[in-house]
Image: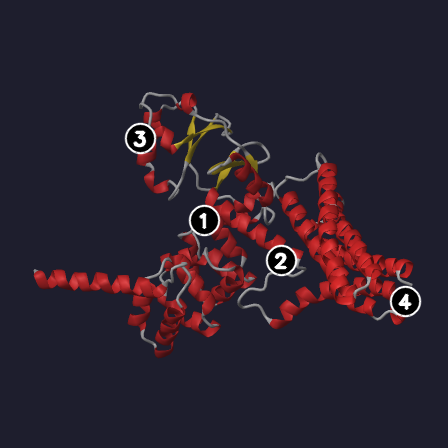
Amino acid sequence: MSRVTDDLNDVAEADEDLEDLALEDDYALNPEFVSDVADALDSGNAERLRELLSALHPADVADLMGFLSASDREELIPHLDPETLAEILSELDSEIREDVLEHVPSATLAKAIGEMESDDAADVVDDLEDDKRAEVMAAMPEQERAAIESTLSYEDETAGRLMQREFVAAPQFWTVGQAIDHFRREADNLPELFFDIYVVDPAYKPVGAVPVSQLLKVGRRTPLAQIMEPVNEITTDLDQEEVAYIFDKYHLISAPVVDPGGRLVGQITVDDIVGVIQEEGEEDILALAGVSDAGRDAGVWDIVRSRLPWLVLALATEAVAVQAIGAFQDEIAKLVTLAVLMPIVASVGGNAGTQALAVAVRALANRELSAANSMRIVAREMTVGLMNGSVVGLIMAGATWMFFQDVRLSITIGLALIINIFLAAVAGVLAPLTLERFGRDPAVSSSVFVTFVTDLMGFLSFLGLASLILL
């Protein structure tokens, strides 16, 4: 008996050692563990591979896929059963998932999709090539196939695509006891995880919701209508960014989704919203820089194609800004010091514009900036720009005096910095507001316009003041 106990303890310790090896303190995969998995794949050691994978959560296996080469991923797929594959597919980055899906047999993929929640299943099917999609859908039960086709009929990035069709509902005339007894009888048909029970009227329209925690606190004879809470209904055509805003504003864990007729057709849970918030945040950050997402498997040409147009546009705007320098070339020739100091004015102005732009775009995304308070925000940024410009201008004027011992030159660059930082702050808030008003994404093009303004006005203000004060 003691030998069996010792063996079990050894196995437990080995599992703990593997878990310690797999993840670092920040939950990132350990490079040594990734190398061990790659070595097991190269040597064909299936037993070692299963041992290594057993130490990982499905989300960590999905992360592992991103660190492996395409050939290693192809070798790994046959070692995953449909249930495990289902959990991994919902966690994979879209680019990597598309690559993985190409190498999964249609029959295996159909079984894996059948293990997934309806929203995740629809996302996976949407990533399939047309031929393979037809094969997979044909291998699925009719009910599951119809649910996925219905979900895919909604526009991308809407509540209809985001929702899961599995939910728990009860008529408003039921008592707590009736609801609990029914749910126990139908346990196999309930969602794996749910937070609210939606109370519906005879037309199947939600009239309230009962949190599961509340259901457990009251007596069996209590009517559901007596303890239900108001619900925030979400329509199937609502944009997912709007849905995320509603969840954040009202601190929701889940919310019912209704069709145009008001009938309950699904629910959205907070775990889906976390993904949306992260996705939308990443899009805004990348858009501010004028680039698109470059995943771990992105090709060179794809990255070049996404970034090059914005660089060309930036080049065109800079060419216009340079014309300001050409207009003052005689003045620059007379005083070479102007060429030395001129980039400082444009550069600092650009930094000030980026600060104001980032704050404005974030405020627009969070609905903190609108027509109702835009004038107050613009006035605030103007004041901030004037104050920051004055401080920076004084510092630069003092530094210029120390190096060049020229009072007029110090005054010139000090005033130029005040003007450019002030204008940069104004442009940083006005550019996204203007784009928003015309229905454009303020995060995409604002940075190009702000850079154009700060460079052009930086050159014009500095060289214009120099021609008046110095020459």
Say left or right for 178 vs 367: left
Say left or right for 101 vs 289: left
* Mark toward the start of the polypeptide (4 vs 3): 3
Q: Amino acid at mark 1?
A: Glu
Instruction: Check whether the beta carbons of the residues at disc 4 and disc 2 lie within 8 A of each other.
Output: no
| Image position of 62 with respect to 370: above or below | below
Say left or right for 242 vs 347: left
Q: What is the secondary structure assignment of the residue under circle 1?
A: helix
* Mark toward the start of the polypeptide (4 vs 2): 2
Q: Amino acid at mark 4?
A: Glu
Tell me if residue 109 can be seen: yes
- Identify the residue under disc 3: 181
Q: What is the secondary structure assignment of the residue under circle 2?
A: helix
Near-viewer residue (235 or 112): 235
Crowd band around label 1 with a 10 angstrom C-alpha radius: few (<14), some (14–19), many (20+): some
Q: Amino acid at mark 2?
A: Leu
Q: CA distance from mark 3 to mark 2?
A: 51 Å
Residue 131, image quadrant: bottom right
Residue at left offset 55%, top offset 42%: 244
Q: What is the secondary structure assignment of the residue under circle 4?
A: helix
- Identify the residue under disc 2: 286
From the viewer's perspective, is the residue at label 4 or at label 1 nearer? 4
Q: CA distance from mark 4 to mark 2?
A: 40 Å
Q: What is the secondary structure assignment of the residue under circle 3?
A: helix
Q: Position of residue 101 (x, y in %)?
A: 48, 64
Tell me if residue 111 can be seen: no
- Identify the residue under disc 4: 331
Residue 190, image quadrant: top left
From the viewer's perspective, is the residue at label 4 or at label 2 nearer? 4
| Image position of 350 with respect to 240: above or below | below
* Mark toward the start of the polypeptide (1 vs 2): 1
- Identify the residue under disc 1: 144
